[in-house]
Image (tube, helix red, strand yellow):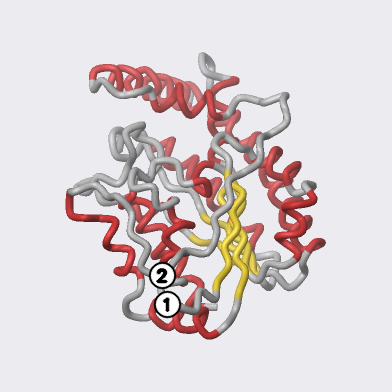
Amino acid sequence: MKKKIVITVIGVFIIGLTIFLVLSNTNSTIEKAIDDAKIEDKKEKPDKKIEKSEPNQKKEIEPEDNVANKVKDLVTGAVQETVQFFTETEAHVVAIGDSLTEGIGDETGTGGYVGMLNNALNSTDENAVEFTKYGKRGRRSDQLLEKLKDPEVKASISDADIVLITIGANDIMKVMKENFTNITSDDFSKARISYEDRLKKIFEKIYSINPRAEVYLLGFYDPFGRYFPQVKELGVIVENWNATGKKITEQYNNATFVPTIDLFDDRNVDLFWKDNFHPNYRGYHRIAERVLEYLHEE
């Protein structure tokens, strides 16, 4: 009986979400996210990389609140010590993963949370921190595992002091795609077991390339809770997958899980892009600030 209830609730959620997005004249979050999660037989195109930022470089920004000017807000309080540490120490940060690493949804062109970290940590003339990122929209954990075989990626990781990872959201969307008309909680549970195995292999691969690297796995946020807070089952799925990621990081001395789910609890602030799935500038700003806080704690 419980399983049937879960099926019905998630089915109603999918139908309701589609109707909501159509009536709002927005693109379908589910359809776009599922399209991103399709298996690509062709070879992946090279990822975009980010170079050191130029001091005082300005970007075109949206007028509302001049949000892009608030990158400097990251450099406050305890986080200032993080910036000072990296300013005095040359470091190489490699970011790998999916659309969150790529920065999809950042309407200011800053480059998402990775670009904001780059701007914050290289805010002085020294530019001591080198950033390289390999993020691709729609990438799943199996595809990231394959990407780690790329000689260029391996070379970057071998030289990295810090590796940042965002991966797994498209694994969840793949479950939705393959079981769209008959989805159950068991489908997500089975997929999570496979995700756990691949995630462990990703960590093992990274440490085989560079045993000294500090690896940070960013957790999932819940993009659905804003519109459907009554659908508790989806929130439980996100929490379970986060627990899996945290469990994997705890198996390594130099790995850290960075939670993000609480950053998007504020329903009075618009933190999502027009697709209602990816963060907008404000959402990425919160993620960047959280990452800096965790870098400070190490």
Q: Position of residue 106 (x, y in %)?
A: 38, 45
Q: State the residue lying farthest toward the top.
A: 181
Q: Is residue 151 left or right of residue 175?
A: right
Q: Which mark is residue 124?
A: 1
Residue placed most toward the observer, 68 or 179? 68
Q: Which mark is residue 85?
A: none
Q: Amino acid type of disc 1? A: Thr
The image shows residue 145, relative to residue 186, as above or below, that is below
Spatial separation of the CA atoms under disc 1 and disc 2:
6 Å
The image shows residue 93, relative to residue 85, as above or below, that is above
Q: Amino acid type of disc 2? A: Pro
Residue 5 visible in the displayed image: no
Q: Quadrant of the C terminus?
A: bottom right
Cβ atoms under marks 1 and 2 closer than 8 Å: yes
Q: Position of residue 225 (x, y in %)?
A: 33, 39
Residue placed most toward the observer, 161 or 129? 129
Q: Position of residue 137 (x, y in %)?
A: 54, 37
Taking the spot 35% from the left edge, 19% from the top edge, the residue there is: 18
Q: Is residue 294 left or right of residue 223?
A: right
Q: Is residue 2 left or right of residue 247?
A: left
Residue placed most toward the observer, 117 or 286? 117
Question: Callout 2: few (<14), some (14-19), or many (20+) C-alpha neighbours within 10 Å?
Answer: few
Taking the spot 40% from the left edge, 43% from the top edge, the residue there is: 222
